[in-house]
Amino acid sequence: MRRRTTVFALAVALMALAAVAVPGAASLNDSTATEAGGVTDSVVADNHIEECAAEPPADYADPDGGNEVLGWVDGIWYNEPLAIDTSDGLNDTELEHLSARTTARVEAIRCLAAVDGTPPVQIQTREEFQANQTGTYANVSEKNRLADNARFETTLMISSEEDSISVREANRGTTVGGFYSPTENRIVVVTDDPENFLIEEQVLAQEVGHAIQDQQFNLTRLVGETTDEDLGYEGLVEGDMNLVDQRYQQACNEGLWNEPCVSESNENGGGSGSGPANWGLYLQSFQPYSEGPPFIQSIYEAEGWDAIDAMYDNPPDSALYTVFPETYEEVDLADVEVADQSSDGWERLTWEDELDYDTLGPSNIAAMFMATTYDSQQPIIDPQSFLNTTAGGEVSNTQPLIYGHPQTEGWRDDKLYTYQNGNQTGTVWKVEWASAEDAKPFIESYGQLAGIRGGEAVDGYEHTYRFGENSDWDMALTLVPDGSTVTVVTAPTVEDLTAVHDIDLVESQESTPTATPTETSTATPTETSTDSSESGDDTAEPTPTETPMSEDTPTATETPEDSDGDGAGFGVLAGVLAVTMTALIVRRRR
């Protein structure tokens, strides 16, 4: 039984093995900033090659064991010099040799053999890649499209005026740096330099790494039934290979390979791109790329690669375990039940041989509340708490974003159902928390989010909002707390809420609540900024194994200066965040 919606399933297939752009921010120039844990930004030194790798002979002769020998693939050793002239791009022979050596290097880092060799590698321009996205979602049914749009309306990520499928296509077209397709056994690397037709070796490394994973563990079976389950699996798959990728790139940066790594960067930093079409969608999809590597590294440091290999037989089935690693193998998810209590012509959408609901999980919840920093310049979660900065105030190269916040802590399960009445839709999203206290930050932040998105508080009720002419959303929404659970209901009108789900709206005890966003305790808005973001890549929803766009390791691109010395005004900071975020998107897709 599956229902991570067919649409999201497709998205995952498209991105899970894709290189996705890394979001980040400029140096915050905050002496109190510390790296919040995860993979250490350190020099790899000579440890970039594991003891499992074979020692190449002086003449680089082929070994007797063929592709079973770690560090040798398709006739090329991991440290074998290649006669590659990158001044005019890569020809077919050069690309073939580079792909083989890159695969051999990944073997030598990860201690896994590419027993079937390197899949065919194709280079596409970004324009070609974007043109191919239209067909990716061509077969999405009307019912799946309806449910997908309703889901994103509920989380206030994609407005009622937009089509979520089109937004998915646009996001992927701008943020993916490459992908591996298990079903087609091929790798595509996207170049932003159509004149020279160069690629980023780091992106190629991640994609051949996914091919090795597929040969060893059969990645096609790691397809979850819900959004959250998929992101849990991706925490393993992307965490594993992004950790390898980080070690690979550090070796490139430190000159530890015997030849420089191939890059399409120019003297100004190279790479082009734009920010994602939708920040919430991007941030949701990026979670396993940011928090998967430190999760995997902690297990690797304790038990080695064998323990990581064993996890493919019992992968983490929720993003909870990478967002809050201390919960892994310690916390079992609740099993939320949501009875169909619709009436007055409303009917729950159901699917044959698929789940009728989706579970969004902590990645989605964090993304809801982080996105407003970038798309509206109105923070709900303080950016200095979700940007993982080093002691020097720069965003971490290895774990740029943090998804564990009061708004996600204590999450234990959720289920979202879609309802239809003619051409109108509604949803019921029930979220279970460890305690009623854990649910409070979620409720409060949802109210702020409603205000930012143009919602107006409904007189006489708490946590109930109407979205009308001053909003891009066209619906009503209510939250009903009940102990450790919160039920979110959406409908076309306030009157329809109780028809979609038989629930008592929370009546106001005193004054009418306001949906106007309140200033967070950590944000300090003092001025606005006209700064705009420069480059950035799609968040790439999960597509076969994609690699987010990336230049090098994410580093700060700008340091905000404030006029009074008391700290950067949020308007300036927001502009800087957006610029750096998109710059890191470009870095990560490369």
Image: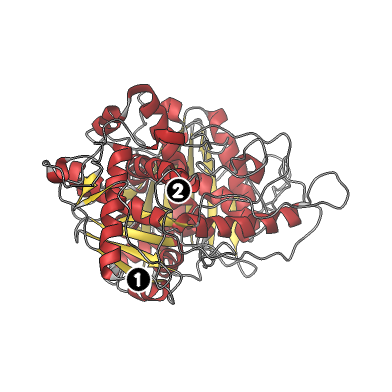
Mark 2, Cα crowd under 10 Å, few <14 / some 14-19 / many 20+, is: many
| Residue underneath mark 1 | 124
* Of 248 and 156, the residue lying toward us: 248
- Amino acid bearing label 2: Cys
Which marked residue is nearer to the observer: mark 2 or mark 1? 2
User: Residue 460 shows which numbered tag?
Assistant: none
Q: Helix, strand or loop at disc 2? A: helix
User: Where in the figure is residue 98, as x and y percent of width and height?
Assistant: 31, 58
Disc 1 crowd, CA 10 A, few/some/many (<14, 14-19, 20+): many
Q: Residue at x 42, y 50 (%)?
A: 428
Disc 1 is placed on an element classified as strand
The three-letter amino acid code for the residue at tag 1 is: Gln
Q: Nearer the viewer, residue 328 or 216?
A: 216
Q: Position of residue 457 (x, y in %)?
A: 65, 54
Q: Quadrant of residue 423?
A: bottom left
User: To which residue does mark 2 refer?
Assistant: 252
Would you place residue 140 above or below residue 289 in this image? below
Residue 558 located left or right of residue 97: right
Does label 2 or label 1 sit earlier along the sequence? Answer: 1
